[in-house]
């Protein structure tokens, strides 16, 4: 935490100095980097910005490729670190297309990472079925038709 604190600038330095004062007076304890990061984000991230990200998560829907949906969802969720893990998982599953949603639910994913892995396995299947759709099964036999005439 002390190493990261050396990289702070502007208002964040003033915030950290107040925290150090509280630590010396034993009002505040810094246990882990995650605690430090969460508190720093909560202090500086505007409430409206958090609502905006929640709105973007709400508006996100799986309409195209699964990989695009997963990447976009992961980026959005990084902006809201204090969102409970169960909410992250629920939002992720609820915004999938019905066929994907049912497969993830059938897999009984209890964590967001498990849901990501299930969807990643479906991405491979989706790609293979897409490429197999456009493969020719047989070559056209135009010579035989010419000879019949």
Image (cartoon, rainbow, N blue to C red):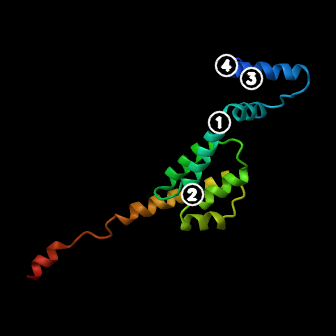
Q: Distance between the residues labelled 3 and 2?
A: 44 Å
| Residue topped by disc 4 | 7
Looking at marks 4 and 3 on the same chain, the residue that comes earlier in the sequence is marked by 4
Please state if 73 lies on the left or on the right of 9 as rendered: left
Residue 50 or residue 129, whichever sits in front: 50
Q: Which of marks 3 and 2 is nearer the N terminus?
A: 3
10 Å crowding of disc 2: few (<14), some (14-19), many (20+): few
**121 or 64: nearer the viewer:** 64
Where disc 4 sits, the SS reads loop
Frontmost of labels 4 and 3 is 3
Label 4 neighbour load within 10 Å: few <14, some 14-19, many 20+: few
Q: Mark 3 points at which residue?
A: 15
Q: Choose top left, top right, bottom left or bottom right for residue 7.
A: top right
* Mark 1 element type: loop
Q: How many marks can you see?
A: 4
Q: Which of marks 4 and 1 is nearer the N terminus?
A: 4
What mark, if any, has residue 121 been given in the picture? 2
Looking at the image, tell me whether mark 2 or mark 1 is earlier in sequence order.
1
From the viewer's perspective, is residue 49 above or below residue 64? Answer: above
Mark sitting on residue 87: none
> Is residue 147 found left or right of 86 in the rendered image?
left
Determine which quarter of the picture holds residue 145. bottom left
Discs 4/1, front: 1
Please tell me whether mark 2 or mark 1 is closer to you in this view.
1
Q: Are marks 4 and 2 in contact (CB under 8 Å)?
A: no
Q: Pinpoint residue 30: horizontal percent, then vertical percent.
A: 83, 28
- Mark 1 highlights which residue? 46
Residues at marks 3 and 1 touching, judged by CB atoms closer than 8 Å: no
When the figure is inspected, residue 7 is found, relative to residue 57, above or below; the finding is above
Q: How far apart are marks 4 and 3 (CA)?
A: 13 Å
- Closer to the camera, 117 or 98? 98
Give residue 42's quadrant in the image: top right
């Amino acid at each position: 935490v002390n190493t990261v604190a050396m990289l702070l600038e502007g208002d964040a330095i003033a915030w950290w100095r107040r925290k150090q004062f509280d630590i010396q007076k034993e009002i505040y304890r810094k246990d882990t980097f995650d605690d430090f990061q969460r508190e720093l984000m909560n202090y500086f991230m505007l409430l409206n910005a958090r609502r905006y990200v929640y709105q973007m998560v709400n508006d996100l829907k799986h309409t195209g490729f699964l990989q695009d949906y997963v990447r976009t969802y992961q980026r959005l969720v990084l902006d809201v670190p204090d969102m409970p893990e169960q909410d992250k998982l629920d939002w992720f599953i609820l915004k999938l297309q019905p066929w994907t949603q049912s497969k993830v639910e059938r897999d009984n994913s209890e964590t967001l990472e498990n849901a990501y892995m299930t969807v990643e396995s479906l991405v491979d299947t989706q790609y293979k079925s897409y490429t197999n759709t456009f493969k020719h099964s047989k070559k056209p036999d135009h010579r035989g038709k010419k000879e019949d005439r």
